[in-house]
Amino acid sequence: MDITIKRNKKVNSLRNAQGFKVKRCCLSCTHKFYDSRGQRRCDLCRLHVGTKDGCDRWEMHAVLKQAGLRPGKVKRKDYLRFVQKIRSEEKVLLEQSQITLKECKTAEQLRTEFGKEIYEIH
């Protein structure tokens, strides 16, 4: 099986059945896995892959195919953006050792805070 990984390629996006935008790259591929050191690898070629890498054998990960479906808890894109913003801020603070993992907000706290923001706007 001959697979060529394209490094740092321009990432194209497509939408899943529910309209959520998904980047077509190794990060969103069903063939990715994490090795014992926590590094992302391709299950097909066993190479380390980066965020913007990709190949012709890309398949959307099952979780991303389901994003926005009724059984899931997240149904609003603005909530996803809200959580992504908070989590990225927490990640920076964690990397700078300004907070600990226990100080990060729980999913319940995020939902409550998001609900308050929505009601304050209207």
Image (cartoon, grey):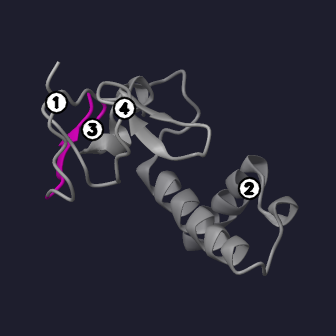
Tags 1 and 3 in contact by the CB under 8 Å rule? no
Residue linked to disc 4 = 46
Mark 2 vs mark 1: in front: 1
Mark 3 vs mark 4: in front: 4
**Residue drawn at (72%, 71%) of the image:** 94
User: Please, is residue 68 above or below residue 23 in the view?
Assistant: above
Residue kind at label 3, given as amino acid type: Gly
**Earlier-in-chain disc, 1 versus 3:** 1
Horizontal and vertical percent for residue 43? 37, 26
Kindly identify which numbered label has been placed on residue 112: 2
Which quarter of the figure has residue 71?
top right
Horizontal and vertical percent for residue 2? 14, 25
Residue linked to disc 1 = 3
Classify mark 3: helix, strand or loop: loop
Classify mark 4: helix, strand or loop: loop
The quadrant the C terminus occupies is bottom right
**Earlier-in-chain disc, 3 versus 4:** 3
**Earlier-in-chain disc, 2 versus 1:** 1
Horizontal side of residue 81 vs 24, given as left or right: right
**Residue drawn at (55%, 72%) of the image:** 121
Which quarter of the figure has residue 117?
bottom right
Q: Give the range drawn in magenta.
A: 10-19
Residue kind at label 4, given as amino acid type: Arg
Which quarter of the figure has residue 118?
bottom right
Residue linked to disc 3 = 19
Could you tell me if residue 20 is visible in this image? no
Separation of marks 2 and 4 at Cα, in angstroms: 41 Å
The quadrant the N terminus occupies is top left
Could you tell me if residue 50 is visible in this image? yes
**Residue drawn at (70%, 81%) of the image:** 96
